Amino acid sequence: MVNPGPARVPSLPVPLLRDAVARQVARASLRSAAREMGISPNGLRNFLNGATPRARTRAKLERWLGKRSARAPKPNVGHLVRLIGEIGADLSPAEVAALARQIAALLEAAYESRRIPPPSWVRELAGYYVPSPRDRQ
């Protein structure tokens, strides 16, 4: 008998897993997603409606999500600019730009603390919101 190795610790809290699975399922159909996962459509529906998954089901959900996420397009500056604009809809343009610079700085610091270079989209975000000479006064 092959030793399956140490038990895998779940990588996401159930509410975050549920949200991520729901977003991916919304791009397909519940039945096709359940088929890909190897679970019943009712089991998937119950999970999306708040049921706590069994350990085996959770592993299937996480494995499926990992495969789907690997195929998902990576973020780009356009996505982030739109998102930051939506987040700061009630703010002035200068405040939105300041918020974006702070987000970019946070992202750069997070990558730096892990000693890995930030992806190009992080650097592009920082460059997109460079303050104009008028903003610096």
Image: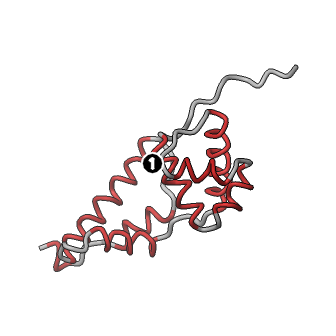
The quarter of the image holding the C terminus is bottom left
Residue under the point 77% across and 25% down: 4
Q: In the image, 61: left or right of 103? A: right
Residue 83 sits in quarter: bottom left
Query: What residue did someone put label 1 on?
Result: 111
Whether residue 81 is situated above or below residue 33 in the rendered picture: below
List the single residue furthest toward the right.
1
Q: Nearer the viewer, residue 111 or 22?
A: 22
Q: Position of residue 55 (x, y in %)?
A: 62, 33
Give the structural element (helix, strand or loop) at label 1.
Answer: helix
Residue 104 sits in quarter: bottom left
Q: Position of residue 31 (x, y in %)?
A: 69, 61
Q: In the image, 45: left or right of 130? A: right
The quarter of the image holding the N terminus is top right
Q: In the image, 41: left or right of 125? A: right
In the image, what residue type sits under mark 1? Answer: Tyr
List the single residue furthest toward the left.
137
Whether residue 7 is situated above or below residue 80 in the rendered picture: above
Q: Nearer the viewer, residue 49 or 83?
A: 49
Residue under the point 38% across and 73% down: 81
Dot 1: within a 10 Å radius of its alpha carbon, few (fewer than 14), some, or many (20 or more) residues?
A: some
Q: Nearer the viewer, residue 102 or 81?
A: 81
Q: Position of residue 29 (x, y in %)?
A: 65, 66
Residue under the point 58% across and 61% down: 24
Q: Position of residue 70 (x, y in %)?
A: 65, 56
Whether residue 19 is situated above or below residue 52 in the rendered picture: below
